[in-house]
């Protein structure tokens, strides 16, 4: 009687199985390297470009506060472009240079350039964001690059609305410096998770002329002020939000006039969360993706 060897006893089959097991083992190791950043190559830090300068603020101090605060909270390296010019038309090095954000992952606009109103110049400021580079906008960044009367609603998509389309919100002015009660109204958003409501020191509450359809409000600010008749009124404005700018993520907050506010851990947490979200480095639960946590 002739007996046929089973597959397990077949030397050729054994060799094939051995190779398959080795390949499967290598695949498991590869997966482990991807899932465990400690085993994989070190994640490169996000490269953020911080732009400061112009009217009405202590940017010379705040640029350092922001850089140190963000870098202490996430794997980010902040590079600065700054001018000490205090005018509403500061000679920022980025102006007229559409490639100013080349090699950066995100741009932080913290400049105050209310009278930089040339359409071609504004288009060059927006060029990196139109090309897909995320944006973070702080305080007076909302009152920059304005064409015409900012108190009149600009038609979305029109030339006068270029900067507002990018921000997702149009603002024209602010009230007196008084405490602002900030409450997160979209608590399940990745940026807001883990952040608590708080009340600022004396700060400026920016108005909302219009909020564009592409915008999602994250936080409101309320401020009690006296009207012209001396009667106390409560002002309520959106103070933090996100915008979908032609497929590019944009985060903004109008808070951040005074140095003590900018240095407040609650403010720096908000800005850092916004930056990480804009760069796609926060998951839906607000957890920082592996490798982008603060370096210890």
Image: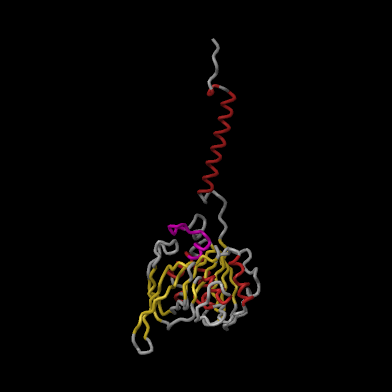
From where the camera sits, is residue 7 visible?
Answer: yes
What stretch of residues is rendered in magenta?
Answer: 274-287
Q: Is residue 278 magenta?
A: yes
Residue 287 image position (x, y, % from top left): 45, 57
**Which residue reaches farthest left?**
231
From the viewer's perspective, tell me whether residue 116 is left or right of residue 178. right
What percent of the width, then of the height, locates residue 89?
59, 82
In the rendered structure, the answer to whether residue 5 lies left or right of residue 207 reads: right
As displayed, is residue 109 above or below residue 115?
Answer: above
In reply to whether residue 197 is colored magenta, the answer given is no
Q: How many marks?
A: 0
Please provide percent x and percent y for residue 239.
44, 73
Residue at the farthest top position: 1
- Give the residue at the far bottom of this rendering: 229
Q: For this view, does 112 lie left or right of residue 174?
A: right
Q: Quadrant of residue 44?
A: bottom right
- For the point 56% across and 61% down, which residue is it? 46
- Residue shown at 40% from the left, 72% from the top: 220
Q: Nearer the viewer, residue 246 or 50?
A: 246
- The residue depicted at 43 percent of the width and 62 percent of the height is 189
Q: Nearer the viewer, residue 5 or 118?
A: 118
The type of colouring in the image is secondary structure
Q: Nearer the viewer, residue 157 or 36?
A: 157
Quarter of the picture containing the N terminus is top right
Give residue 12's position: percent from left, percent from top.
Answer: 59, 25
Q: Which residue is painted at 47% across and 64% down in the image?
A: 273
- Foreground pick, 87 / 148: 148
Tell me the chief SS of the magenta region. Answer: loop
Asked which quadrant contains residue 121, the reply is: bottom right
């Amino acid at each position: 009687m002739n007996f046929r060897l089973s597959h397990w006893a077949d030397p050729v089959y054994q060799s094939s199985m051995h190779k398959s097991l080795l390949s499967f083992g290598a695949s498991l190791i590869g997966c482990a390297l991807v899932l465990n950043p400690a085993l994989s190559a070190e994640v490169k830090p996000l490269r953020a470009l911080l732009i400061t300068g112009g009217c009405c603020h202590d940017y010379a101090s705040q640029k350092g506060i922001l850089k140190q605060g963000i870098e202490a909270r996430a794997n980010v390296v902040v590079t600065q472009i700054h001018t000490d010019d205090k005018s509403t038309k500061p000679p920022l090095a980025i102006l007229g240079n559409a490639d100013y954000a080349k090699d950066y992952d995100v741009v932080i606009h913290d400049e105050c350039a209310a009278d930089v109103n040339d359409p071609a110049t504004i288009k060059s400021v927006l060029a990196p964001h139109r090309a897909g580079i995320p944006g973070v906008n702080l305080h007076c960044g909302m009152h920059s690059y304005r064409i015409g009367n900012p108190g009149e609603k600009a038609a979305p998509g029109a030339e006068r609305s270029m900067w507002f389309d990018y921000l997702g919100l149009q603002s024209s002015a602010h009230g007196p410096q008084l405490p602002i009660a900030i409450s997160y109204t979209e608590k399940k958003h990745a940026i807001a998770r883990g952040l608590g409501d708080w009340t600022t020191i004396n700060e400026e509450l920016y108005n909302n002329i219009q909020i564009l359809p592409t915008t999602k409000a994250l936080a409101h600010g309320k401020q009690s002020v006296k009207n012209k008749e001396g009667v106390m009124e409560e002002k309520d404005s959106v103070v933090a939000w996100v915008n979908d700018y032609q497929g590019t993520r944009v985060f903004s907050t109008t808070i951040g006039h005074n140095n003590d506010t900018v240095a407040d851990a609650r403010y720096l947490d908000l800005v850092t969360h916004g930056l990480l979200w804009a760069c796609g480095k926060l998951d839906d639960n607000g957890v920082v993706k592996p490798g982008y946590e603060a370096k210890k």
